[in-house]
Image: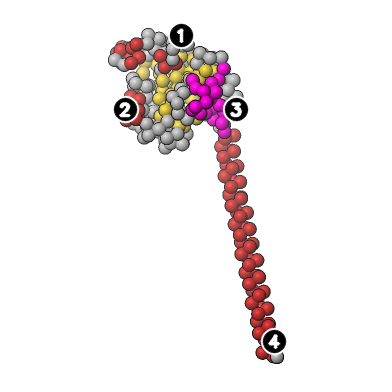
């Protein structure tokens, strides 16, 4: 009897130990799940904060006279080229002005026109993506690129145009090449600044000055004469014109679009 009693007590102690281990494991799982949920919440909060921080003027920019052309939601400052409304392919998505192929396309242009300006924005493209930023657009032509000079927007590594500096990201498309590739990896935001003052135009990409030229200068005229643009007499001839974002059939996103008239 004494032996049986000791065996019973041993089994009871073992059972309690097993239950304690199980409870400890369950608590650990609960903590891990809570930690996972906490990390997810932090990630979501970080994305929301990043989105909220976009499409706002800094105090310095506001004081300098910049205006937002996109606030993260409204496309009121935009319409389609030779259209009254915004093409269906363009919409506000997660704080970006996005183009989605296959649902109705067309180059997007500002409702207002601009002469001398300081334009700043950010862009990103998908793999092998292609788009462009125009200025000086006149709607007397068949397409926006027949009048408006273009700063190329491109996945240099994935698109064949990236193999030619004249058509790579940051270039004055087809005419002036950047000295080096300063683009960020696909899916990351690239920072742009374009300044036009009179006929002088300067492009910056990710803080680096990549292009500078003077419209109607002898050099510019010679370059145009040797390019496809010679067939369009309106190309680069409109000092007062619309800004534009190109539909090239690929997904592209723009944000933090702000401009200051000079």
**Residue denoted by label 4:** 5
Of tags 4 and 1, the one toward the viewer is 4
Residue 73's disc is 3
Which residue is disc 1 drawn over? 140
Q: Is residue 62 above or below residue 84?
A: below
Figure quadrant of residue 66:
top right
Residue 164, labelled with which disc? Answer: 2
Which of discs 3 and 1 lies nearer the camera? The answer is 1
Quick check: is 96 in the magenta stretch?
yes
Q: Nearer the viewer, mark 2 or mark 4?
A: 4
Left or right: where 175 falls relative to 248: left
Disc sitting over residue 8 in the figure? none
Q: Which structural element holds mark 4?
A: helix
Q: CA distance from mark 2 to mark 4?
A: 89 Å
Q: Which residues are magenta?
A: 85-106
Q: Could you tell me how far apart the alpha carbons at marks 1 and 2 are, in whole angstroms?
A: 30 Å
Q: Nearer the viewer, mark 1 or mark 2?
A: 1
């Amino acid at each position: 009897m004494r032996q049986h009693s000791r065996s019973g007590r041993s089994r009871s102690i073992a059972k309690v130990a097993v239950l304690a281990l199980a409870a400890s494991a369950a608590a650990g799982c609960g903590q891990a799940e809570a930690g996972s949920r906490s990390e997810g919440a932090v990630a979501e909060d970080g994305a929301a904060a990043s989105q909220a921080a976009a499409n706002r003027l800094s105090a310095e920019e506001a004081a300098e006279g910049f205006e937002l052309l996109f606030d993260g939601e409204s496309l009121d400052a935009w319409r389609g080229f030779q259209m009254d409304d915004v093409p269906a392919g363009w919409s506000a998505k997660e704080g970006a002005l996005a183009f989605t192929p296959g649902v109705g396309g067309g180059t997007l242009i500002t409702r207002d026109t601009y002469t001398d300006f300081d334009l700043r924005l950010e862009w990103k493209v998908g793999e092998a993506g292609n788009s462009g930023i125009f200025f000086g657009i006149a709607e007397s032509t068949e397409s926006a690129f027949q009048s408006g000079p273009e700063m190329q927007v491109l996945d240099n590594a994935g698109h064949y145009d990236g193999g030619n500096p004249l058509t790579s990201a940051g270039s004055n498309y087809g005419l002036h090449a950047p000295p080096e590739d300063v683009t960020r990896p696909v899916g990351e935001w690239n920072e742009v600044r374009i300044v036009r003052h009179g006929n002088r135009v300067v492009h910056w990409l990710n803080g680096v000055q990549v292009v500078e030229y003077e419209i109607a200068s002898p050099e510019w005229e010679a370059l145009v004469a040797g390019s496809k643009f010679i067939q369009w007499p309106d190309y680069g001839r409109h000092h007062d014109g619309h800004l534009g974002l190109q539909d090239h059939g690929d997904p592209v996103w723009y944000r933090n679009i702000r401009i200051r008239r000079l």
